Image (spheres, rainbow, N blue to C red):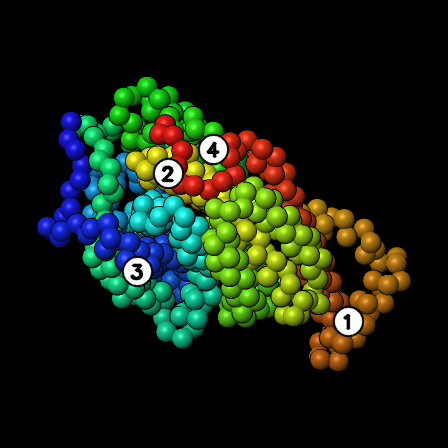
Amino acid sequence: MTSIALPLGGRPQLSRAEVHGARYLIAFAVTLASVLELVDTSIVNVAIPHMMGNLGATLEEIAWVSTGYIVANVIVLPLTGWLSERLGRRNYYTGSIVLFTVASYFCGNAGTLESLVFWRIVQGIGGGALISTAQAILFDVFPREEAGTAMAIFGMGVMVGPTLGPTLGGWITDNYAWPWIFYINIPLGILAGWLTWRYVPEPDHHIEMPDHVDWKGLALLILGIGALQILLERGESHDWFASREIVTEAAVAVTALLLFVWHELRTPFPVVNLRILANRQLATGVVFGLLLGFALYASVFALPVFLQNLLGYTAWDTGKVILPGALASAVTMAVAGKFNTRIDARLSITAGVLLFTYSMWLHYHFTMELGMGDLLAPMILRGVAMGLIFVPLTAVTVADLSPKLMAQGTGMFNLSRQLGGSFGIAITATLLTRFTEQARDALRPHLSMTDPGPRQWLAGVERLFMRQGGTQGEAALKAQAALEGLVHQQASVIAFERVFLTMGLLFLLGLPLLLLFRTGRAQPGAGPAH
């Protein structure tokens, strides 16, 4: 057995007083690193057409630039506690930032699709540690009474990151070139890495680790989580289980994950300690984290598509719509962090879920006549809702964990949130397709040429096209195409409305889970060691 407490490079450990004095610098460093990781999850989406043209790739091929990053990220998430213990937390976190930053340079410098996908996978491996390990660091360096403040600082980045990515990516791509969406990480990554190496301490507790590695568990985890994430990323474009590829990935994911759970519960030194899920507080928070990820990522995915595809907004216009909600979320988190230990977290989470549901109810009434001013209230309400949920939920989920289990607990929580987001995006994309088809089928019977309304509309459009030049036959075809376009547009609006309402109702149905929490008091590290 070996004891893991290995500072690299000989930098002396800071005293607890020095760490306490530098706690806000530490919070800034780890939050900055986390924001970089989250922004890079979505920043590439708006640059995909430029990459396709520059690298000569098809849409399906270029999709691996996003899929490879997310798959690597999700695989690493549950391993962060184990890797922190084996390598030393400061070493692992700093090394992850360095790996992420170096990979960002090579992504921007990639001249082929293969090299870009490879370095995106490496970037995802580096980024996987940046969120869950950051939370463990913050819970360790901030005193218990300030844990809510720490989570508020961190939560601002986590909430703003997913919404900032597409807007920032669009602005950079329009004004510079797509490699700069990666190059922008380099100075910020260097800053975050240096601050982490300079100020982040090793934890006070020391964990005994075996000399051997649980390679079987590691292989099953990579296979199972990897297959599941690829399935979720590619399912809609391959018509789900009508595709042999998706069926194969589903079979691999289910088999590997079942074997993984069976193996990890039997081996004495597992690569992921699933036994901590016997802690009811953590298990409940992990399940609720799935719902939070679903609601957050699904709404972040659906709204820009609605604004840009149907209302014709640019990426920058979309960013201006989203910004008030992000600011509202940041302010709410700051307030929630101050009162985190004084208010029962279950009350705050309930209020947040109800507000989110009301926001989705307002989204449900979106139309093609929507103006920017009409979006202000729904965006602010959604931002306030997420602010009321994130800080209390994070803190109360790990309230019963001892410090030595904090990294593993935060890793589990963040994995559930990330997987919830993947499920949310996949299900939202599928529902949009299904709901659009259903609405189109429902609208068509009302457009019969025997009805005077559609007949008069088509005649008017035909006359308009004929005045612009062309035969009556050409004008008739163009008028019919215009009518089909209107039907599809209206069907899409109905589909988005139904998706928004579905998100709100699903989150609302998760409220009874709060009854399973042992306590609503967020005192990380105060509970018994499990």
Q: Is residue 256 visible?
A: no
Instruction: Point out which mark residue 525 bears.
Output: 2
Vertical arrangement, residue 417 with respect to residue 157, above or below: above
Question: Which secondary structure lies at badge 1?
Answer: helix
What amino acid does circle 2 point to?
Gly
Q: CA distance from mark 2 to mark 4?
A: 12 Å
Q: Quadrant of residue 72?
A: top left
Q: CA distance from mark 2 to mark 3?
A: 22 Å
Vertical arrangement, residue 17 with respect to residue 326, above or below: above
Instruction: Point out which mark residue 281 bears.
Output: 4
**Left or right: where does residue 421 sit relative to residue 506?**
left
Nearer the observer, disc 2 or disc 1?
A: 2
Instruction: Point out which mark residue 482 bears.
Output: none
Question: Which secondary structure lies at badge 3?
Answer: helix
> In the rendering, at what x and y percent does residue 326 appear?
51, 61
N-term mark: 1 or 3: 3
Q: Residues within 10 Å of mark 4 (few under 14, many from 20)?
A: many
N-term mark: 4 or 1: 4
Q: Nearer the viewer, residue 226 or 201?
A: 201
